[in-house]
Image: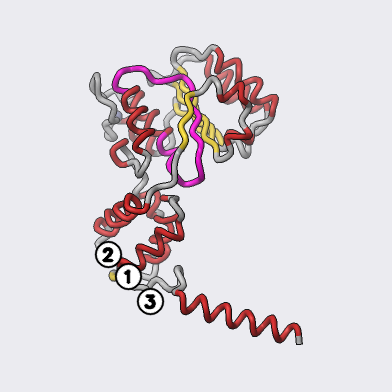
Amino acid sequence: MALYHTYRPQTFADVVGQEHIVKTITNQIASGRVAHAYLFSGARGLGKTTTARLIAKAINCPKRKAGAFEPCDACDSCQEIRGSRAIDVIEIDAASQTGVDNVRENIIESARFQPTKSPYKVFIIDEAHMLSTSAFNALLKTLEEPPEHVVLILATTEPHKIPDTIISRCQRFDFKKVAYDTMKQHLEMIAKAEKIKVDADVADRIINKSDGCVRDAVSLLDQIMATGEKHITADAASLVLPTARVDETLRFVRSLILKNAAD
Ligand SMILES: [Zn+2]
């Protein structure tokens, strides 16, 4: 299994670097004031879908105590959501289902019926900005009068493409790029769990290259770990993260090739 999936947060405490969002949402869950519609915006790989699944897990977890916000992460409901096979948590990839017919069938019609075995039906719409105008219009009616048992979570990397009428009916949260130190701690946690040592200069380059995106940082570490080294030095990582010298050499070779081509 990819490292990113292994270390995907399964509780709110594990979410990396989105404290402002986690605080508000966990307060809502603990006090039973979860909104019917959310809009999660921000760059890819920051945890929008992960957070959406955590909300679904928490509000549908029968073991969650009154006033608490964390899902138990052990009951059937939590396990089903973790494995993406919960019947009442519907994930829709708007990039491949842009049309109004899909939205009617998979969201609007489905939302009318009670959940099968959970308190809430949760719809997670990824890449929501890809929906067609007529699909958004159809969705608007559900957002205006959401059934009591429905929570809709729209996730998007391009919020400016979402109609204002939709945005105004959602609680909006902007996911931020993860700060350097937070990312460093996260990589250290994974390295420790995987029983490997990552040299500081390698960690530094992973963090800089991933530019605040947790998924990219963990994927880079995953690729480097594929070499099988238990102690990851700049040399061991050089195939995935070329050192400055390799970069220079490549540039030099390229310039020679271009020069030859010009001659
Ligand atoms: Zn549970």
Tell me: 193 left or right of 252.
left
In the foreground, 204 or 120:
204
Task: Identify the secondary structure beneath mark 2.
Answer: loop
How many numbered discs sit on the rendered protein?
3
Query: Which residue is under mark 2?
Result: 196
Residue type beneath disc 3: Asp
Q: In the drawing, what numbered circle is on residue 235?
A: 3
Taking the magenta stretch, the answer to whether it contains residue 40 is: yes
The residues colored magenta run 29-51
Tell me where residue 17 appears, x and y as whole percent: 36, 43
Q: What's the residue at 50%, 45% (across, down)? A: 44
Dots 1 and 3: beta carbons under 8 Å?
no
Label placed on residue 40: none
Relative horizontal placement of residue 212, taking residue 155 as reference (left or right): left
Q: Position of residue 29 (x, y in %)?
A: 33, 23
What is the C-alpha distance between the residues marked 2 and 1?
Answer: 7 Å
Q: Are marks 2 and 1 in contact (CB under 8 Å)?
A: yes
Q: Ligand 1 near label 3 (Cβ, under 8 Å)?
A: no
Quarter residue 184 falls in: bottom left
| Res 203 seen here | yes
Q: CA distance from mark 1 to mark 3?
A: 8 Å
Q: Residue 158 magenta-drawn?
A: no
The amino acid type, in three-letter code, at marker 1 is: Ile
Q: Which image quadrant for residue 75?
A: top left
Q: Quadrant of the C terminus?
A: bottom right
Residue 80 seen anywhere in this rendered image of the structure: no
- Kind of residue indicated by mark 2: Ile
Direction from residue 19 to residue 166 in the image, left or right: right
Where is mark 1, residue-wise? 232
Q: Position of residue 83 (x, y in %)?
A: 40, 39
